[in-house]
Amino acid sequence: MNSVEIVSKDKLPLPYMLINGKRTLLVVGNPMEHEVEVELNISLKALDFPLNKKHLKVTTLRPKEMSIGRLTAEELLHFRMTVPADKIPGGGLVVYLFELK
């Protein structure tokens, strides 16, 4: 399990990643009663992916499954998201899937 650097005006739990070689799950929590905007600095090394990889397939799994498409390693260094408020349906947590394709 790897952690990832987070930039937010709110104090949030440290996001973490679960890695199996070709896929990585990123979990970002928000215990606040309001939604938060965050920027993550994700490197290919942190994802445990080959450093020469040009693009990764990214999918949101929670709160709603949705393909984001392919992102470059540079785009991952400034990966932005909104994490919904806690204690609402679908809130408090976002989960992304990163895949080598």
Image (cartoon, rainbow, N blue to C red):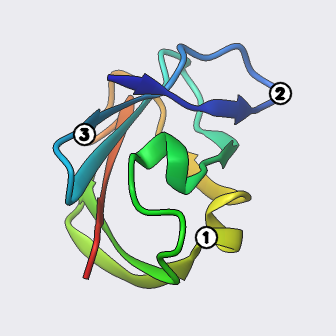
Of the residues under marks 2 and 1, which one precedes in the sequence? 2
Q: Is residue 38 left or right of residue 65?
A: right
Q: Nearer the viewer, mark 2 or mark 3?
A: 3
Element class at badge 2: loop
Q: Residues within 10 Å of mark 3 (few under 14, many from 20)?
A: some
The residue that label 2 is drawn on is 9
Which quadrant is home to the C terminus?
bottom left
Which quadrant is home to the N terminus?
top left
Q: Report how far apart the C-alphas of labels 2 and 3 lie in the structure.
A: 28 Å
The residue that label 1 is drawn on is 73
Q: Residue at x 25, y 39 (%)?
A: 19
Give the x, y percent position of residue 86: 41, 24
The residue that label 3 is drawn on is 19
Q: Report how far apart the C-alphas of labels 2 and 1 lie in the structure.
A: 24 Å
| Mark 1 residue type | Ala
Element class at badge 1: helix
| Mark 3 residue type | Ile
Of the residues under marks 1 and 3, which one precedes in the sequence? 3
User: In which quadrant of the rendered view does residue 74 lie?
Assistant: bottom right
Q: Nearer the viewer, mark 2 or mark 1?
A: 1
Q: Are marks 2 and 1 in contact (CB under 8 Å)?
A: no
User: In which quadrant of the rendered view does residue 32 lie?
Assistant: top right
| Mark 2 residue type | Lys
Give the x, y percent position of residue 97: 27, 58
Give the x, y percent position of residue 16: 41, 27
Q: Is residue 20 left or right of residue 15?
A: left
